[in-house]
Amino acid sequence: MSDAKPLPRPNAETKPYWDAASKGELLYRHCPACGHAQFPPRDICAACHRPGTEWGKASGRGTVHSFTVVHRAPSAVFKSETPYVIALIDCAEGFRIMTNLRGEGVAAKAGVGRGVRIVFEATHDPAIKLPQAVLEE
Amino acid sequence: MTFTRKAIISGVAETAIGELPGSTCLGLHAEAAAAALADAGLGYGDIDGVLCAYSFVAPYPMLSSVFCEHVGIRPAVTFAIQVGGASAATMIMQAAALVEAGYCRHVLCVTGDNRVSGLSRDGAVAALAAFGHPEFEQPYGISIPAAYALVARRYMHETGATLEHLAAIAVEHRRHAARHPKAQMRKPITLDEVMASRVIASPLRLFDCCLISDGGAAVIVSAAETAADLRKPGIRLLGAGQGHTHEHLVAAPSLTDFGCKQAAARAFSQAGLKPTDVDVAEIYDSFTITLLVELESIGFFAKGEAGPAAASGALGLGGSLPCNTHGGLLSFGHSGAAGGMFHAVEAVRQLRGEAEARQVAGAEIAFVHGDGGILSAHCSLVMGRG
């Protein structure tokens, strides 16, 4: 089993998202026809089913929709990080992403509805940065 | 539109459940199939349809063909179905459709996996993390318990459900399992023990999570017109329905409203029945929160009321809705797609009056529900006696 964390392997539809993340920008797809904002990024609109959703740049602001403090990791590589926090973040633009919540003592401070901002975390692959969330003070 | 269903359940069986050294995926399938055939009074030659699900230990791309090859049968129809924990109920729904459309007379629905002996508990947890999105969930260390924990946190936030409510569900399941000779975990547990068990992914603790087991189970669905050839009276499939909203949690439209609502509504509508008509329920319980959400979404309890009901004993053998009388995934066992099949097997036993110490007196209508993914794919069945 690999010692490295599983990293995304971008495909044609998701590569711009990861390219932008590596430069510190959070992108999402929105539909010019119906206005739906969606995640994960893909061309077809999951609300009106038209092709041709477009990239938008997100503000990086959001709120915690839910969170969990993980004590039992799914694999050895995550075991060394326990306890760690996984959250679903409702982004201001109307789409939802999953991140870890980062920051000192965040497991005790996290709460549903808390404001967050997205930061970008280096990985063992220089081409990939992971969007993560930190609590707003 | 009412639709008179013409499919009956003619045979059910499960293998031993637990840690079974020396067991194999195909061996568990074969053992469950043979036992279900014996239960039905049928032979391999009578089976003209075979439905399988999937295995993590032996991930064949064509499991149903492999199974037929393994036991040496050449059915008229066979294919595999993959909707996670909804697979078993979906297989039964599909088998009934094959029988009613005239393609088959006897369809074997067979499941099994040796997740403990074949993968180890760590291996099974790691393999299950593959349900997470490879790009947008797995890099964050998601696991199945963590995903359900995210549902639990939000659900508790919105409905007022408490840790004590979840714990009461775990305690009741263990009480049920103690009455089933094959259950993997039969030692009673207390509310305090559940509350004090170690946190897996907050708010879920060890006893909020299902077991990991080796085991297999099979159900045979037959045409009603074959009743005279069968060893036991058939159990009628009165209604079946599905509901689907997402696969990955990050794309779920809601963390409190899931496809179980539509699945159950469709199944009840087809049966011409409602939740209050149900005598015994066998509902997917991968986690305590899974059952809580499903009980409320399906309409057995109003939102916010399933927890207090569980705490007051409503899900027990003498309660208003005896639920998971075999002990469920939480205490009977969970071996992949067979986990959901155990619920169906138990429902049939209850309706036949074969449930011994855990029999719900006079049970005539049973409800079975499976959920796959993170409350993603749902299938409900309504079964009736005679």
Image (cartoon, helix red, strand yellow):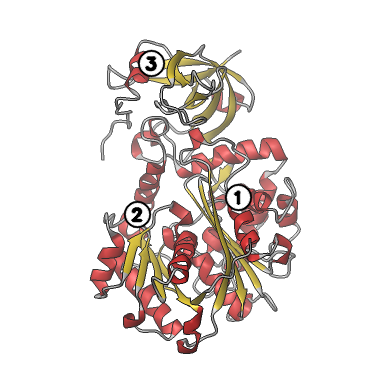
Q: Chain of mark 1?
A: B
Q: Which mark, by number, is residue B120?
A: 2
Q: Going 43% across and 52% down the picture, which residue do you hit?
A: B83
Q: Going 45% across and 88% down the picture, which residue do you hit?
A: B229
Which label lies toward us, 1 or 2? 1
Which amino acid type corresponds to the residue marked 2 in the rendered image?
Ser
One can see residue A109 in this view: yes
User: Looking at the picture, does residue A59 appear above or below residue B62?
Assistant: above
User: Looking at the picture, does residue A104 appear above or below residue A66?
Assistant: above
Image quadrant in which the C terminus of chain B is located:
bottom right
Viewer-closest of B152 and B189: B152
Q: Is residue B304 left or right of residue B285?
A: right
Q: Chain of mark 2?
A: B
Q: Position of residue B103 (x, y in %)?
A: 39, 70
Callout 3 and callout 1 share a chain: no
Which amino acid type corresponds to the residue marked 3 in the rendered image?
Ala
Residue ID for mark 1: B262
Q: Position of residue A91 (x, y in %)?
A: 55, 20
Q: Going 55% across and 37% down the picture, which residue do you hit?
A: B150
Q: Is residue B354 left or right of residue A3?
A: right
Q: Helix, strand or loop at disc 3? A: helix
Label 3 – label 2 distance at C-alpha: 37 Å
3 and 1 marks in contact (CB < 8 Å): no
Q: Chain of mark 3?
A: A
Residue ID for mark 3: A21
Q: Helix, strand or loop at disc 1? A: helix
3 and 2 marks in contact (CB < 8 Å): no
Q: Position of residue A44 (x, y in %)?
A: 42, 28
